[in-house]
């Protein structure tokens, strides 16, 4: 199953103005009305919660209505339709998009990916002993950088039965586990994506089922911190970060959002192939990150103590 | 008593953060309804470090009838802080006593 990753997340919200402002400030571009895209056209889509075209809501607090997965080609779509039609209804939309439900009850859809190939520079650094990342006179600290999210990286669900949920994605859709937090959940990677994870889950009671967070990849740690700092400056509520995770190695910075889910910037995630052996540890503060910082007000050094100059 | 804000700083039917810590993060959420001011610790019962809003002074759902936790979408009643839906179902925000005097809102308790 040549699944690439999440193409689109569709929300049903009762505060669409606040959500629009958030997503624009986060750095996504509104290309169609209420469709907010990253550079590769992966997107967050907003709809009014009473929009009759939306899939029904879960009976929980989550505003996520549908997760649309991008796949490589029509052959993959056909294979998914054949596989999932064995035990559930799969409907085909006008654009060929398949819609169904996963084993936890989340509405999911599949389409030939909307992603365009990006050809962009990485974050370039100078490191002693290595070839310089930047040419002489090329400045690293660019405060005017656009800091646009590049692509929808991953999603994290609260699920009532992590094993049942994981097995659906593994046995039916060909995902593999890269790493696992015991009693919390596994990190999953689909076959057509070498990122450490596009899907993670956290075991919770049924009444919590929903979207824990979504994340977009940034160019690198500097761009992540620039984008996050801009959010703080605009008054948005930082939840966790900046820091660097252990599993996946990705830099992270999470914000609260008016969609009622955390929204993360991430950067520099590990990549894996079939030679990788999964690691498993209990979830803990130590395991959740390598280090954690918090944004503070800007400051500058000076000369003597105040009033002594 | 600790001064939180002027009463007029909280719009009728609206919300406001108050009592910022050293890093500028508001410790208290204030809500004004029909001449009353309700105050809660600005933290969701779900976690010990989970501020409720998504942006400075933004704490309410779309029609302003509930406090929204912008972490996972929990909704709390304004009058008693009880969570009606969300990860902290059945739990409640921590209420704080406030006193309105001379057009100002005071925390009627040791500072949180």
Image (cartoon, rainbow, N blue to C red):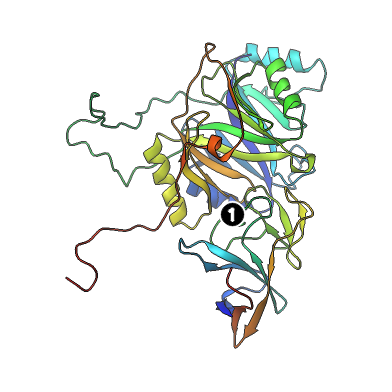
Instruction: Residue B90: give x, y in percent of width and height.
Output: 79, 54
Could you say which is closer to the camera, residue A280 or residue A93?
A: A280
The residue that appears at 51% across and 23% down in the rendered structure is A195
Quarter of the image for the C terminus of chain B: give it. Answer: bottom right
Is A153 left or right of B59, judged from the image as shown? left
Could you say which is closer to the camera, residue A216 or residue A114?
A: A216
The residue that appears at 32% across and 46% down in the rendered structure is A144
Is A118 left or right of A101, judged from the image as shown? left
Instruction: Residue B29: give x, y in percent of width and height.
Output: 62, 66
- In which quarter of the view is residue A126 placed? top left
Against A135, residue A298 (above or below) is below
Label 1 marks a residue whose chain is A
Residue linked to disc 1: A18
Is A72 left or right of A56, judged from the image as shown? left
The residue that appears at 30% across and 43% down in the rendered structure is A142
Against A204, residue B22 (above or below) is below
The residue that appears at 53% across and 38% down in the rendered structure is A286
């Amino acid at each position: 199953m040549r699944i690439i990753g999440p193409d689109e997340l569709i929300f049903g919200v009762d505060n669409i103005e606040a959500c629009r402002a958030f997503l624009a400030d986060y750095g996504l571009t509104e290309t169609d009305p209420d469709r907010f895209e990253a550079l590769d056209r992966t997107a967050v889509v907003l709809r009014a919660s009473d929009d009759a075209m939306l899939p029904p809501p879960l009976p929980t607090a989550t505003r996520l209505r549908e997760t649309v997965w991008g796949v490589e080609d029509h052959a993959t779509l056909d294979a998914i339709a054949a596989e999932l039609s064995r035990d559930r209804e799969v409907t085909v939309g006008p654009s060929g998009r398949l819609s169904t439900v996963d084993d936890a009850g989340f509405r999911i859809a599949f389409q030939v990916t909307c992603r365009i190939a990006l050809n962009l520079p990485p974050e370039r650094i100078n490191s002693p002993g290595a070839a310089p990342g930047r040419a002489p006179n090329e400045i690293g600290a660019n405060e005017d950088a656009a800091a646009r999210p590049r692509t929808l990286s991953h999603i994290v669900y609260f699920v009532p039965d992590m094993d049942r949920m994981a097995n659906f994605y593994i046995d039916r859709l060909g995902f593999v586990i890269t790493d696992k937090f015991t009693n919390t959940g596994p990190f999953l990677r689909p076959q057509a994506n070498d990122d450490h994870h596009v899907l993670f889950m956290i075991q919770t009671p049924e009444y919590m089922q929903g979207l824990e967070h979504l994340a977009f990849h940034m160019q690198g740690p500097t761009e992540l911190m620039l984008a996050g700092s801009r959010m703080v400056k605009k008054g948005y509520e930082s939840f966790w970060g900046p820091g660097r995770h252990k599993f996946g190695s990705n830099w992270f910075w999470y914000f609260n959002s008016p969609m009622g889910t955390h929204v993360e910037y991430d950067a520099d995630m590990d990549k894996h192939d079939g030679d990788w052996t999964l690691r498993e540890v209990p979830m803990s503060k130590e395991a959740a990150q390598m280090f954690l910082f918090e944004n503070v007000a800007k400051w500058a050094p000076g000369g003597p103590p105040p009033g002594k100059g | 008593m600790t001064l939180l804000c002027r009463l007029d700083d909280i719009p009728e039917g609206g919300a406001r953060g108050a009592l910022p810590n050293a890093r500028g993060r508001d410790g208290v959420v204030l809500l004004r309804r029909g001449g009353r001011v309700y105050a809660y610790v600005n933290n969701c019962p779900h976690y010990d470090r989970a501020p409720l809003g998504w942006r400075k002074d933004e704490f309410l759902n779309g029609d302003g009838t509930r406090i929204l936790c912008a972490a996972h979408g929990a909704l709390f009643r304004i009058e008693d802080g009880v969570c009606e839906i969300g990860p902290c179902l059945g739990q409640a925000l921590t209420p704080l006593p406030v006193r309105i005097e001379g057009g100002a809102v005071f925390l009627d308790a040791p500072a949180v």
